Amino acid sequence: MKTDIILAGVGGQGILSIATALGEAVLLENLYLKQAETHGMSQRGGAVVSHLRISGKPIASDLIPLGGADLILSVEPMESLRYLPFLKENGYLVTNTNPFINIPDYPEITLVMEKIRSLPHYVAIDADQIAKEIGNARTSNMVMLGAASPFIHIEFSKIEAGIRSTFERKGEAIVSMNMKALHAGRQFAEANR
Amino acid sequence: MQKHLLLGAEAVGQGAIDGGLSGVYAYPGTPSTEITEYIQGNPLAIERHIHRKWSANEKTAYEAALGMSYAGKRSLVCMKHVGLNVAADAFMNSAVTGVHGGLILAVADDPSMHSSQNEQDSRYYAGFAMIPVLEPSNQQEAYDMAYEGFELSERTGLPVMLRITTRLAHSRSGIVRREVKAQKELKLPNDLMQFVLLPAIARRRYNELLGKQTMLKELSDQSVYNQYIEGKDNHKGIVCCGIAVNYLNECYRDTVCPHPVIRVSQYPLPEKLLKRMNDECDEILVMEEGFPLVEEKLKGFFSNRIPVRGRLDGTLPRCGELNPDHVAKSLGKELKPGMTVPDIVANRPPAMCQGCGHIDAYQAMNEAMAKYGKGHVFSDIGCYTLGALPPYEAINSCVDMGASITMAKGASDAGLSPSVAVIGDSTFAHSGITALLDAVNEHAPVTVVISDNESVSMTGGQDSSAEGKIEDICRGLGVDPAHIRVIVPLKKNHEEMVRIFREELEYPDVSVIIPRRECLQRATRRKRNLSRE
């Protein structure tokens, strides 16, 4: 069992909340984990990436080698493309379709989506819209985690438990909201993979 | 065994707490910040009354840690690599005084300069001061070395450097904790002259330091952290420092490396292990995160031994952090990159947050400065350094903490007029105060902008040690109170700000403009915490 994930986004979008929930799930499964994060300057609206490695055996490198990622999970469409050299030949790209535009030369979003749709394995999901429908825009990252969950080799019930333990101290309402988001994302991915 | 998911930096904090820590001293700096933040939020640290407040800068932090060591207790001082430049005076001399209670200097280097002005390698400093270094290869070792480091420090009577780099500092993995040790009791040094570096005493202490070097080398040869791993293929021997061994193992994931490997995680270098490799192998490949320190040592001046490969001969890149791909390439392995990055993907550099007060201050300053042309503004280290980038292009320097004011003064001495400094509140407290005193003493016609967001923001919103004191400090240094101008950097105040900038730029002596508005990130966090309580 081994899943190497590139988590991508823009500083401030909270990609680490996805990593935290997965980390909790990994602990529950008694798996090994290494997760290299971006802290510091890039957190101010720059491109941020986290290398998340999960395995049944001890993990050597904190970083994923080129062509080694099973999955790119991006909360921003252009950022999902930045890490293509890391994606395995049969790897999946799962991305939110909502652009985060904080630079003057952001490309035409139609071109970005065209590139994404030209990939052999992808899930493009409007996580913000789904999160809003659920009733809390802030759950969009959990929608993304749900959308990626079919491609992560951890039992889904453990990911659910990971979410529970991440949000537990914020109360049952927040837990169930995020759980709903997780399920909605997963459902979308199953239907649109 | 209960595993705890910790960043490498956090593992250092937990290891120190469990190892009997009584005080951590630090100034925030990426990638070292999380060590201290972790201790600040740790229930055991709070229960044990471990000192954990931020210091004004790395020098004051180091000295306080040394004072705690003098009093017999175990102390930890944390900083980023360039912070050690600030603390270097205390650091170098602490090797001569030696320690009493164990003292660990945790220093986090930033190869590839993710968030730094340079990628200097702190191991050189340790060699310079002649003290031991521990360089963990993973999060568990980061914990273990912080835990054990105090004893190494007390046993050798020297400060111990615990050197980590960005990748380990900011990568999370499971660690297993050990039994929590008691803190040390308050106890004066046996020799009350130990810390008095008068020349006669300093010479004696220095000779003692020199005398300890043989013991340090022996400790390195025996250390469990330095290992000679057998390999059948002697055409090449590989030396891996710190985390480099992980990248090596990544290249042999389902097999084992055929070459002999030396893991180096404790310095001074384990000479016996290295001599064996030098005798038995046809060439040596050195993988180290940072400068080619070990490679240079092995090469010697005339390179007249077996070939030594690494960063100097291009086998590995000369600069930047290592990664599994660099290491694979150095072993002659083929890389298998996925698809290329499409051309449409644009760069996304960091930027000041929308609505940030620094932006309003820069917009007013730029308008007031327009008639003088570009090139008059010296700046400093913080979020506002991003004002160098478009669309602001407002500043012309970022060198070291506090340099804005002194460089503006020097340029003004040379005849540049106006000469302006832009510095943040925390950077001002760190190293700007003495700079401002220099300017005041010579009536230098500089305009100092202290862009005050009441926070150390770039590193995540820590408390600024000058909060609420800046005007008093400026007045105390002798700045004319009529020329200390506080403004609120908001769009609606733009015209007023421009007017104030214009007035002070014309003033032929030191003036200070303080645009003050709380950091947005910090305000958001504060409100979120309030709503939680």
Image (spheres, helix red, strand yellow):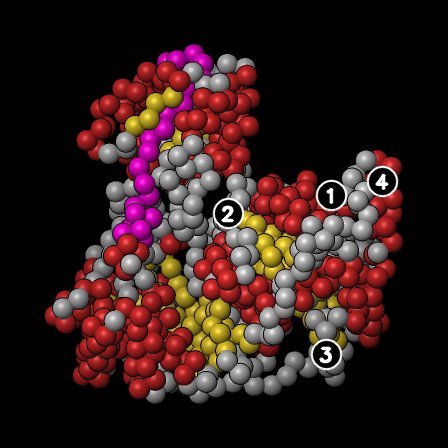
Which numbered mark, 2 or 1, is in the foreground of this view? 2
- Front residue of this view, candidates B99 and B321: B99
Residue shown at 43%/12% (left/top)? B508
Q: Provide the secondary structure element on which disc 3 rests.
A: strand
The answer to whether residue B427 is visible is yes
Residue shown at 27%/19% (left/top)? B499
The spot of residue B452 in percent (x, y) is: 37, 35
Residue shown at 87%/54% (left/top)? B211
| Residue at mark 2 to residue at mark 4: CA–CA distance | 33 Å
* Quadrant holding the C terminus of chain B: bottom left
- Residue under circle 4? B201
Chain under label 4? B
Residue B300 falls within the magenta-colored stretch? no
- Using residue B409 as the reference point, say whether residue A182 is left or right of it: left
The spot of residue B373 in percent (x, y) is: 36, 22
The answer to whether residue A89 is visible is no
- Residue under circle 3? B229
Mark 2 vs mark 4: tell me if same chain: yes
- Front residue of this view, candidates B526 and A127: B526
Question: Is A54 located above or below residue B156 in the figure?
Answer: below
Tell me the quarter of the picture where residue B490 sits. top left
Amino acid type, residue under disc 3 in the picture: Ile
Residue B516 falls within the magenta-colored stretch? yes
Mark 3 vs mark 2: tell me if same chain: yes
Q: Are marks 2 and 4 in contact (CB under 8 Å)?
A: no
- Residue under circle 1? B93
Question: Is B527 located above or below residue A184 in the figure?
Answer: above
Residue extending furthest toward the top: B508
Which numbered mark, 1 or 4, is in the foreground of this view? 4
Pointer 4: residues within 10 angstroms few (<14), some, or many (20+)? some
Mark 3 or mark 2: name the one nearer the start of the chain.
Answer: 2
